[in-house]
């Protein structure tokens, strides 16, 4: 990154991905715009339509995402102060973070799921809602301080089918499950529209550091999964080093096959097969890239794998 103080982090990201983004100007425009607040309604704590009706007394412009009937945006900045949030009827969550559980058809029929890097619980609580507190979820995180927020969210949303564990997933013991959600630590570039920490701390050296961690976690998941199990890998970064590069490396060593992701009304770009003179396995085209200017969201990357 250039040392010139006038050279913003946003501009650094724009320059880095100019060669692979389809519309550089729209990309530039969107990552400089703040995101609207977004949330889910937790049906474990009440009727969805009743909760939505109450929320619209604060903001009658609340709108539903085109691609998810339980994802909403609002102009309110203080949604966390609402009684609906306090009692667990809603969960404040970025729209892109809601995508991974939607990539597995009939998730509500699964008996056991492991959320490998779960805190603060966005996906865990969404999965529990989809499962209607049936089956079993193991919500794991490696950082003790983050478990407080995870447990707090599980309690607030009335979730009873989830066990919390504290472990670096790279050393997690063999545990059978039907599906594994692997939302790994990453450089978080895709959250730049909302997180000031990214604007302050962005460092290109992080790509190599994070990709090593990501490969380790995903390798462990692939090793313990049984034939037919679903594995959902996701990040909130643009960086191919942490996305397609990780998946391509896994395809070389693990018995998994990639599954195409398609969510109606959500604009998805396929994964890239090369980056900075590095060629990736052509199967990574089945991965999904979510760019900020395509759906007016954060950026996101998702891969669905099946153990062979």
Image (cartoon, helix red, strand yellow):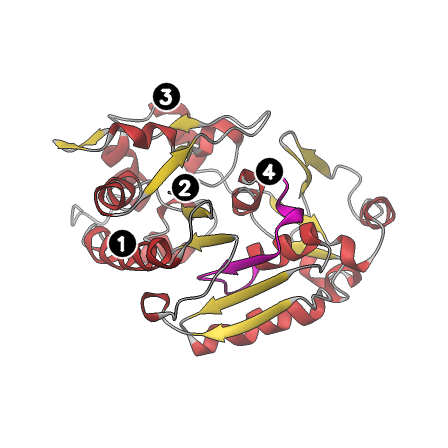
Look at discs 1 and 3 and give the one toward the viewer: 1
Cα separation between marks 4 and 1: 26 Å
Q: Secondary structure at mark 1?
A: helix
Residue at image position (50%, 65%) is 119
Residue at image position (37%, 51%) is 188
Q: Is residue 202 above or below residue 245?
A: below
Cα separation between marks 2 and 3: 29 Å
Ranked by sequence position, the earlier of labels 1 and 2 is 1
Q: Is residue 244 above or below residue 215?
A: above
Give, as a single range, the part of the protein colored magenta.
Answer: 106-121
Q: For this rendering, which residue is in front, 254 or 59?
A: 254
Look at discs 1 and 2 and give the one toward the viewer: 2
Q: For this rendering, which residue is in front, 205 or 144?
A: 144
Magenta-drawn stretch contains 114: yes
**Residue, disc 1:** 215
**Residue, disc 2:** 305
């Amino acid at each position: 990154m250039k040392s010139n103080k006038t050279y913003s982090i946003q501009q650094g990201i724009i320059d880095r991905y100019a060669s692979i983004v389809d519309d550089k100007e729209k990309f530039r425009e969107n990552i400089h715009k703040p995101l609207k607040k977004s949330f889910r309604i937790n049906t474990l704590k009440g009727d969805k339509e009743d909760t939505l009706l109450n929320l619209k007394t604060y903001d009658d412009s609340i709108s539903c995402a085109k691609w998810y009937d339980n994802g909403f945006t609002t102009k309110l900045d203080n949604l966390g102060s609402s009684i609906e949030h306090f009692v667990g009827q809603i969960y404040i969550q970025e729209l892109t973070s809601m995508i991974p559980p939607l990539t597995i058809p009939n998730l509500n029929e699964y008996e056991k799921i492991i959320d490998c890097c779960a805190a603060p619980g966005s996906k865990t609580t969404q999965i529990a809602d989809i499962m209607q507190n049936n089956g079993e979820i193991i919500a794991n995180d490696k950082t003790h301080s983050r478990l407080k927020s995870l447990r707090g969210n599980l309690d607030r949303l009335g979730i009873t089918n989830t066990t919390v564990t504290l472990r670096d997933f790279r050393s997690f013991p063999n545990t059978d499950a039907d599906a594994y959600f692997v939302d790994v630590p990453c450089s978080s570039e895709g959250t730049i529209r909302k997180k000031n920490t990214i604007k302050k701390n962005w460092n290109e050296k992080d790509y190599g550091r994070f990709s090593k961690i990501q490969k380790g976690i995903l390798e462990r998941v692939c090793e313990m999964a049984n034939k037919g199990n679903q594995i959902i890998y996701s990040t909130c970064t643009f960086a191919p080093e942490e996305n397609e590069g990780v998946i391509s490396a896994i395809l070389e060593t693990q018995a998994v096959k990639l599954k195409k992701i398609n969510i109606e009304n959500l604009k998805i770009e396929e994964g890239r097969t090369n980056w900075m003179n590095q060629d990736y396995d052509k199967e990574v085209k089945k991965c999904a890239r979510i760019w900020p200017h395509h759906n007016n969201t954060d950026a996101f990357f998702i891969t669905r794998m099946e153990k062979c």
